Structures are given as C-alpha cells and as structure tokens.
Amino acid sequence: MDKRDFYSLLKAVPKAEIHLHQEAVPERKIINKLYKKCSGREMTEVELNNLFSYSDLEGFLQSFMSVQRMFTEEKDLRFIIDALDSYVHANNIVYAETFFAPTSLLKKGFDFTYSINILTAGFKKIKEKRGCTIKTIVDVSRSFGVENAQHNLDLVLHEKNPEIIGIGLGGSETFGPARDFASVFDNAKKAGLHTVVHAGETEDSWSMKDAINLLHAERIGHGTSAAYDEDFIKELAQRQLPLEVCPTSNIFTKKYVKELKDHPVKQLFDKGVFITINTDDPSFFKVSLIDEYWNIYKLMGFSLENIRTIIKNGFRASFISQEEKDAYCAKVDEAWNAWFESHPKA
Ligand code: HPA
Ligand code: ZN
C-alpha cells in the first residue's frame, strides 16, 4: 500500500496511545511561545536546534527538563491541553494514557492539586469536543531519588482524582535503577493504582526483569533490550506482558538501535511478545502516531493485518474494562472494513 492510502486508512481507524508524555506534545513553535512568555524573547533557530539535539537518553532528558522549566505558572499547562487536542484529532486517537511528570514543576512551587485540576478539566473538554478519553499516569521519576518518588505518590493518593489511573517510572534508567523504587511501587499497588515502568530503554533485560518482579510493572515502556535475551522473550510471550514500544524514540536515544529498519520490534512480535506502538515524545522526536505505524509497515516488515492487530493491542493493553476494550476493538474492525470497502483498489 502506498503512503497516501496508508495514512488515509490509519486516519480512518480509531487508535489508542498508551506511552505519551504530556509535556512533549506541544509543537516546537508552541514551545517557542512558552519560551517567549517566560524569557521575553523567542529562541533563535540555533537555540531551537540545540534544544532538540541529543545523542543519548541523558541528553534527551536534559532537553525535556529544559522544556519543563519553561512552564512558569500552573496556567501554562493549557499549552499541553491545546497541543493534545490537536494531536489526538490529527491521529484519530480515541483513548490515551499519558504521563505527567510533576517533580520539576513542584520544585519551583507549582501546586499539585491545581495543576492536576487544570489538566483534567482540559482533558474533559477534549472528551466533550472530540470523544477522546485522556487519562493521566503520574511519572514519579527515578531521577530525583526514592523520597521524591514517594512524595509524588503521596500527592496522587491524597488527590484521589479518578483521572489519575496509575504511576510510572521515567527518567534515567542507568542512574535510577528500578529496584530502588520497589517500596514506592508496592505502596502504589496496595492502593489500587496501576504501575508501568520505563525499562530496557538503555539497560539490558535485567532492568526489565526488576521492573516486572520487584515493581509489579503491568506494562514495560520501551523494552528494546528484551530482544537480546531469548529466554526472557519466551517469558514475555508466555506472560503476555505488554511492551510500549516507541521505535523513533529509540533511534534518537541511540542505545540499542541506530536505524529504524534495524529495530527488533518485528522479531519480538513474531515470537509472540505483546507489542503496542507509541511515540513517547512526539515533538522531541518529530513523529506522530500515524508516522510511527507507517515506519513499522514500511521499514520493519509488518503486514497490514499485523498493523490492525497492533492497533487493537493498544486498547487491549490499556487499563480500561474488558467491555470497553471489546467495544473499541469492534470499532477498529468496523472502520478498517469500511475503509477497504470504500477503497476497492487499495
Ligand atoms: N525515558 C525516560 N524518561 C522519559 C522518556 C523516556 O523515553 N520520555 C520522557 N521522559
Ligand atoms: Zn517515555
């Protein structure tokens, strides 16, 4: 199928995205507006290019935090809402589980309740306008120590906001090993929150094993390094524990794969691992969800039927009820079949 038809098909089919960082959705020109608001001038072309250049995860995380620093008051969070509104519309995303990382905002005095209320009120408006449900997973962060992570969890527990469905662990996998955060994730699990962990992004499969065995991770963010551990691949396939694969992100952070065509996600899929496809940080990696599906179709050998399965996997791996999963998957099939009926030559 050519690119034009592929994008038309993918636009027609409702999708879920379950690994998406809220702060990384506003486009570069919006980030420049935010910069102007906080510093009184726009970034030059060179400054913008520098901000969005990184050669590894640590460099990317510095850029991510630079963008977070541009949010100077809670009301700036509206930039995230507007960006998500356009993003879900452009990609026909009808359900999203999105990360919000409060640490650096809280450190400069943001109020957690006020921030979360602004975001969730904004997401409610998106739901009314577009029919897209956006849930929040609070990234308690592995970059600022265990006490900070527990503090973030305490705020979530105090909030009791049903739009916050779980906690995640992002940040530096190398400098903040998952096992250090076992007590925090234990507490989250006991309180009935869902738990997801970035792992296998810059560390070998031991890191994913710790995330699953010690942190009760229900899904793994990235999981790239699983591809180099055959026994673990078998275990993942047997347990059907979903991976939130973000191919372009992995190319930017350059740890295990340097080019999209060499990404091991197809091997994992063929060996029965539960694969979902996501963008991670669309404005940082200049990629949309539909682009990412095109990448795996065009460059990694996924068939159209594989693509349909992976789209449904996005819903199946999410934290909604089985009835909702079935209803969304039925809508995927309906839209898929309708598109082919109206494009008989495709
Ligand atoms: N890894 C870790 N932390 C992050 C990422 C990521 O890919 N994106 C945003 N925060
Ligand atoms: Zn991520």
Image (cartoon, grey):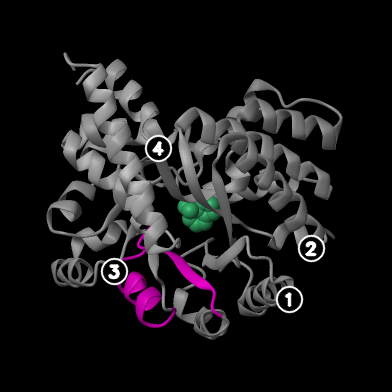
Task: Give the magenta range.
Answer: 192-215
Q: Amino acid at mark 2?
A: Thr
**Figure quadrant of residue 25:** top right
How many marks overall? 4
Q: Amino acid at mark 4?
A: Pro
Seen in the image, is 67 located left or right of residue 237? right
**Figure quadrant of residue 9:** top left
Question: From where the camera sits, is residue 59 visible?
Answer: no
How many C-alpha atoms fall within 10 Å of the one at disc 1: few (<14), some, or many (≥20)?
Answer: few
Alpha carbon of mark 1 to alpha carbon of mark 2: how far? Answer: 9 Å
**Figure quadrant of residue 101:** bottom right
Q: Is residue 206 shown in magenta?
A: yes
Sequence-wise, which precedes: disc 1 or disc 2? 2
Report the front residue among 153 and 120. 120
Label 3 beta carbon within 8 A of ligand 1 = no
Alpha carbon of mark 1 to alpha carbon of mark 3: how far? Answer: 34 Å
Please tell me the numbered disc located at residue 205. 3
Sequence-wise, which precedes: disc 3 or disc 2? 2
Per the image, label 4 sits on a secondary structure element best described as: loop
Q: Which residue is mark 4?
A: 14
Q: Which residue is mark 2?
A: 113
Q: Which residue is mark 1?
A: 158
How many C-alpha atoms fall within 10 Å of the one at disc 4: few (<14), some, or many (≥20)?
Answer: many
Sequence-wise, which precedes: disc 4 or disc 1? 4
The location of residue 3, given as percent across then percent down, is 28, 19
Identify which residue is drawn at 34% across, 57% down: 316
Image position of 114 with respect to 279: above or below: below
The location of residue 341, given as percent across then percent down, is 22, 22
